[in-house]
Image (spheres, rainbow, N blue to C red):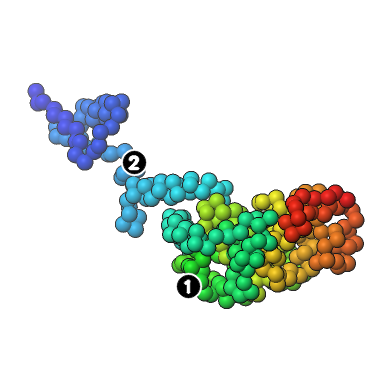
Amino acid sequence: MATKTVIVSSVGTKKKPRLLKENRLKIAVESASTTPNARAVHLPRPKSAETLPRKSGKSTSRAIQKKSTRKSAESILERKGDARTPGKRLSIEEELLRVREAQAAIMRNPGPPLGSGASLYKQLSSTVTGPSLISQHILIGNKDDAADIDGLHKLGVTHVLNVATQQTPNFYPKDFVYTNISIFDKPDENLNQHKKTAVEFLQRVEKMKGRVLVHCIAGVSRSVSFVIMHLMVTHQMFLRVAYDHVKSIRPYILPNNGFLLQLAKLETELFGLTSVASAPEWNFYEWNSIKHKTKKFEPVTASSGGFGCFIL
């Protein structure tokens, strides 16, 4: 009686769980019993992550490792979404590297404290040209400032918020992290529809301890309005306080009446009060016709000898 030999091939396979190995052996024996003079039975290997077909010369395991590294970088930020401009851009790892490299420049050029330190900072270091440091992490500038790469590196800029993308390009997308907002300096433009994009991007920079240039064309209206919006939403500053802070550092700011009106309405939504009922910058018909519907108060700023507010 001829002896039937069963050979289970294990070449090229990796160690599998005990139950899987026993099942494969059982399949081999049953197959051999129904196949006369069978010399060997080669079992197909189950598909796994290691055996998936390669794409573009990179193994799946390498891709998994890269994804893991990316997740690690993202966990540092603890963010809900990516506020950066989509498309061609620096990776998150490169972004973090830029921030680390910029720390020395940021420390050499410190920004003013928010609120009470603005007037003192103006007396010490305010200039009429170039970008203005509004805080440790935020600058306001114009188109020329955005094109001055040496000046940006000197100040430790890591990010750029371009709020005039239909009029000026992203000059250095390989050097800085950009986010774009397309809006014109017109009273009927809607600031609020871009609030989430602008505020989340500025919050991201602050969390990373980087430094962002917010710029439009002249650096007096659009960029100023978005920075004030951020100060109100993120730092809970009343509109009058935020506006005075920015103006004390950049005295030639001039948001148009439509932007001023939208900022005033945003303040009432955030705080249920208005701090600009008697502010001369808000003395125009559209605001005067509705401000009586909101509770009013007058903030006391550092320039007037204190900080607080009077409810009227």
Tell me which residue sits at (78%, 54%) in the image. 300
**Is 168 located above or below residue 112 in the figure?**
below
The residue lying furthest to the left in this view is 1
Residue under numbered circle 1:
150
Amino acid type shown at disc 2: Ser
Secondary structure category for the residue under label 2: loop
Mark earlier in primary sequence (1, 2): 2
Q: Distance between the residues labelled 1 and 2?
A: 51 Å
Q: How crowded is mark 1: few (under 14 residues within 10 Å), some or many (20 or more)?
A: few
Left or right of 300 on screen, residue 39: left
- The percent position of residue 241, horizontal first and vertical second, equals 74, 57
Residue positioned 68% across, 55% down in the render: 116
Residue type highlighted by circle 1 = Asp
In the rendered image, the vertical position of residue 170 relative to residue 245, given as above or below: below
Q: Provide the secondary structure element on which disc 1 rests.
A: helix
Q: Nearer the viewer, residue 40 or 128?
A: 128
Q: Position of residue 310 (x, y in %)?
A: 83, 50
Q: Is residue 272 visible?
A: yes
Seen at 66% across and 61% down, the residue is 120
Query: In the rendered image, which quarter is residue 247 located in?
Result: bottom right
Residue 48 numbered tag: 2
Relative to 190, 311 lies left or right: right
Q: How crowded is mark 2: few (under 14 residues within 10 Å), some or many (20 or more)?
A: few
CB within 8 Å, label 1 to label 2: no
- Pick the residue in front: 11 or 207: 207
Note whether residue 166 is visible.
no
